[in-house]
Amino acid sequence: MKKVYITLAALLLIVATYFIYKYYFAINFEEVTVERTTENCEDNCFSVNLNYLKCKGASEFATNFNKEIELQIANFLLCNDDDSLQIDDVSIEKALDNFLSDYNNLHEHFPNIPAYELTLTDSIMWQNDKMLSLISNRYSFTGGTDAIQKKVYINFALDNGEVITNENLFTDEDKVLAIADKYFRIAHDTAQVESLDGKSFDFEDGKFRLPKNIGVGKQGVLLFYEPFEIAPYLDVPFEVVIPMEEVEKYLTFSSK
């Protein structure tokens, strides 16, 4: 009988350890979809479609990852990704309610305004045993002359879920700058892009810079330049890919 009790205790310990690991340490994601649209609308309908990832469990990674995602989406809804108008501590649902309320108030006074449309889709595009890189594809039309489409890359440390800043992404930024400059020039020379004033686009002072938006994918490090980050009259995004074999050894969170 004593052996039976010992066996049962061991099994209970194994099961408990499994669930503790799964809840507090393992990284598991679920996809969340949030949709809002004008009720009983057939034409020119307001719509919001959010597809994002939520990390399950109570680990430090899950807490920090979910907090950052919530912050990103709230700012997308309320500030339209304007870096000068960042907000904190607003839930996705609250931000969505505020966005819809502002739109309804505006539409009440100006019923002929075009319907707003926001779409956001998040996915993980690369991961090793130290970090993961998430891409957020975003589309917004809020009554201006043109819709805005952009990509946002967010890099997370796997041990604690903290966002990896550009300053901490590379072990030797000078070497990465030299490599990136080479691939920027290659992309620049083959691109079918012109600035609004008809001139060839380049950095205003001719000095190469990394963009604020840097991601890591299977093909390599991705440099996504927003309009006006390069030439003052360039109104379309521009992306450069640095092959992984050229730059992986300089990633702070590389597995190698």
Image (cartoon, rainbow, N blue to C red):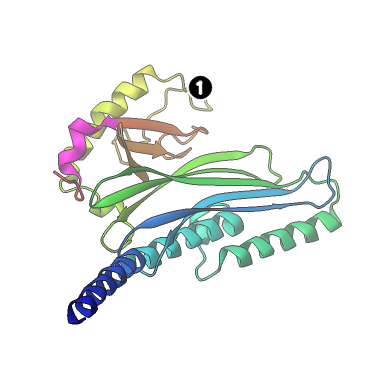
Quarter of the picture containing the N terminus is: bottom left
The residue carrying mark 1 is 198
Locate residue 102, reporting x and y percent.
72, 61
Q: Residue at x 25, y 69 (%)?
A: 14
Q: Is residue 119 covered in magenta?
A: no
Q: Nearer the viewer, residue 28 or 162?
A: 28
Locate residue 180, reporting x and y percent.
25, 33
Quarter of the picture containing the C terminus is: top left
Q: Residue at x 51, y 32 (%)?
A: 236
Locate residue 52, reporting x and y percent.
51, 52
Q: Residue at x 32, y 31 (%)?
A: 241
- Asked if residue 136 lies left or right of residue 22, the reply is right
Task: Identify the image quadrant of residue 186.
Answer: top left
In this view, the residue farthest toward the front is 1
Q: Is residue 243 covered in magenta?
A: yes
Magenta segment, prevailing SS (helix, strand or loop) = helix
Locate residue 83, reporting x and y percent.
48, 55
- Asked if residue 225 lies left or right of residue 70, the reply is left
